[in-house]
Amino acid sequence: MHTSGDHTMTGPLSGADGAGMALGIECGAREPEPTTERGVQASPDHRPAPLPVRLVRSARVTVHIVGGLTTTVLVFPWISPPQRRTLIRRWSQQLLQMLNIEARVHWRHNGGLPGNVLIVANHISWLDIFVLNALQPARFIAKADLKHWPVVGRLIANVGTLFIERERRRDTHTVNRHTVEALSRGDLVAVFPEGTTSDGTGLLKFHSSLLQSIVDAEGHMQPVAIRYRTPADQHCAAPAYVGEVSLLASFWRVTGERGISAELHLMPPVPAQARHRRDLSRAAEEAIRTALASPGSAPAPDRRGDRQA
């Protein structure tokens, strides 16, 4: 696995359990149109994967999702939380392999991801969740609408997702309380403070409300920058889940890539005890912006999507 940064850890993607797996083979292509539907930018000289490849990938992922849901219903009630995390991590790694997505982890500090840590990441795609879970499973905070998605909604609910009605201030307090309880038990929790997806070329404004939980839990905030790259180390637009694109259309676009590199830049953790959540939000935004501006990224104006986290 390719890695880079101030403190680089070379090797396959691995989490706290020590297991590792190299994800994907190569990073790939886009459709020949200068733009994809709904305004997502694409390079005009890229060719999509052949139709048979896309169909096989789609079929394999469909079976994989059904299998994952079955596991959460029939197996999860009878095994321990560490065993569940191992299965979630392995399942996420296998999903990325099926889509030919290679995860590259860039550690900007020494150490791993212990418990009582709140991951704060930028948000580009539904793929973000699986890329993070392939590193180390976390409980995600997501908008309540997602649990009503067919099959996928039940799957993400069964793996411990915390759902929030963003329009209700009282619900934010309730989710923060549940998050503090999870963090205090040693769970890893992840939030997307932008509150919606972007196209991956920049950051949207960070919202600090859900960062109160790590202050109350007296833990650490872990900023993580996510970006998707092509074989030529250019910005890859395919994963961006923005605009009016449906989930199925977004998935089909990803299957058309000959390969994608998903980069995770783990910046130095920030102690949250006695900090104001707005200070933490600014620190996370600055750290992630710094990582995205490192060599290989192509700065561009933000284009807001409407896919709320």
Image (spheres, rainbow, N blue to C red):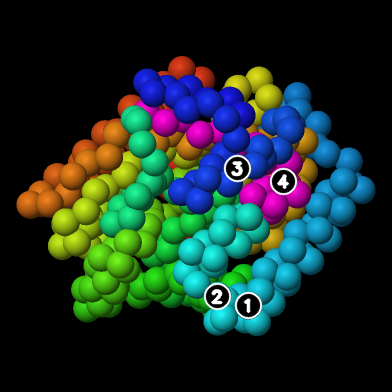
Task: Work out how far the residue at label 3 is from the one at label 4, CA to CA, in angstroms.
Answer: 13 Å
Task: Work out how far the residue at label 3 is from the one at label 2, CA to CA, in angstroms.
Answer: 21 Å
Say whether residue 96 is magenta.
yes
Task: Work out how far the residue at label 2 is from the one at label 1, CA to CA, in angstroms.
Answer: 7 Å
Task: Work out how far the residue at label 1 is from the one at label 4, CA to CA, in angstroms.
Answer: 23 Å
Q: Are marks 2 and 1 in contact (CB under 8 Å)?
A: yes
Q: Quick one: SS at disc 2?
A: loop
Task: Work out how far the residue at label 2 is from the one at label 4, CA to CA, in angstroms.
Answer: 26 Å
> Which residue was labeled with disc 4?
97
| Nearest-to-viewer mark from 2 and 1 | 2
* Residue that appears at 51% across and 34% down: 105
Q: Residues within 10 Å of mark 2 (few under 14, many from 20)?
A: few
* Total labels drawn: 4
* Residue that appears at 74% across and 33% down: 25
From which residue to which does the magenta span run?
93-108
Q: Is residue 200 visible?
A: yes
Tell me which numbered mark, 3 or 1, is placed earlier along the sequence.
3
> Which residue was labeled with disc 2?
79
Tag 3: residue type?
Gly
Q: Quick one: SS at disc 4?
A: helix
